[in-house]
Amino acid sequence: MLIVGLVLAAAAAAFHVFIFALESLKWTEPETRKIFGVASEADALTTKQLAFNQGFYNLFLALATLFGIGFALFGFETIGLTLVFAGTGMMLAAALVLVLSDRSKSRAALMQGTLPLLAVVVTAIALAIR
């Protein structure tokens, strides 16, 4: 069951790498603007620096999670699972902040937070039933 939790954590990390690419590398592209509801190229240019920075937050959460998975798989379970819980827990917390700050972002928060939630729950259950 622990492997299932780690697979879910890896999927959450992959999703956050995708978001990094959109926010930090493709922010002004029409497809990305549509995904994030940015009305115009001018608006995208105005917010580009903020999105760039936010994208790196997503990347760092993903990297912490991926490093944790690696440590756990190579026998350093305490370090690894600490990083997995920290990475996915912060992903989940960010999704909660998003939905609590703007209810119209519920769909985005659900997309951002479902995999991390499942990873946290499944991994915690796996550890509890050992």
Image (cartoon, rainbow, N blue to C red):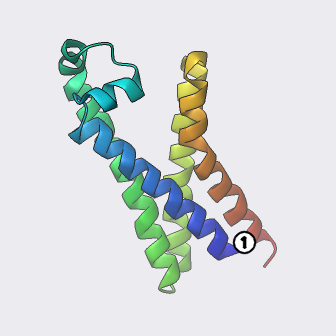
- Image position of 88 (left or right of 41): right
Residue 76 visible in the displayed image: no
Q: Residue furthest right?
A: 129
Mark 1 Cα within 10 Å, few/some/many (few <14, many 20+)? Answer: few
Residue depicted at 54% across the width and 53% down the height: 88
- Say if 67 sits above or below 64 in the image: below
Q: Residue furthest bottom?
A: 75
- Image position of 38 (left or right of 130): left
Residue depicted at 51% across the width and 86% down the height: 75
Q: Residue furthest front?
A: 31
- Percent across and percent down for residue 4 are 65, 70
Q: Give the quarter of the image for residue 27.
A: top left
Quarter of the image with the C terminus in it: bottom right
Q: In the depicted view, which residue is nearer to us: 68 or 39? A: 39
Q: In the depicted view, which residue is nearer to us: 74 or 20? A: 20
- For label 1, the SS is helix
Kind of residue indicated by mark 1: Leu
Residue 53 visible in the displayed image: yes
Quarter of the image with the N terminus in it: bottom right
- Percent across and percent down for residue 16 are 42, 48
Residue depicted at 30% across the width and 36% down the height: 23
Q: In the depicted view, which residue is nearer to us: 99 or 84? A: 99
- Percent across and percent down for residue 69 are 49, 71
- Image position of 3 (left or right of 57): right
Q: Mark 1 = which residue?
A: 127
Give the number of marks.
1
Residue depicted at 71% across the width and 62% down the height: 122
Q: In the depicted view, which residue is nearer to us: 116 or 40? A: 40
- Percent across and percent down for residue 98 are 53, 27
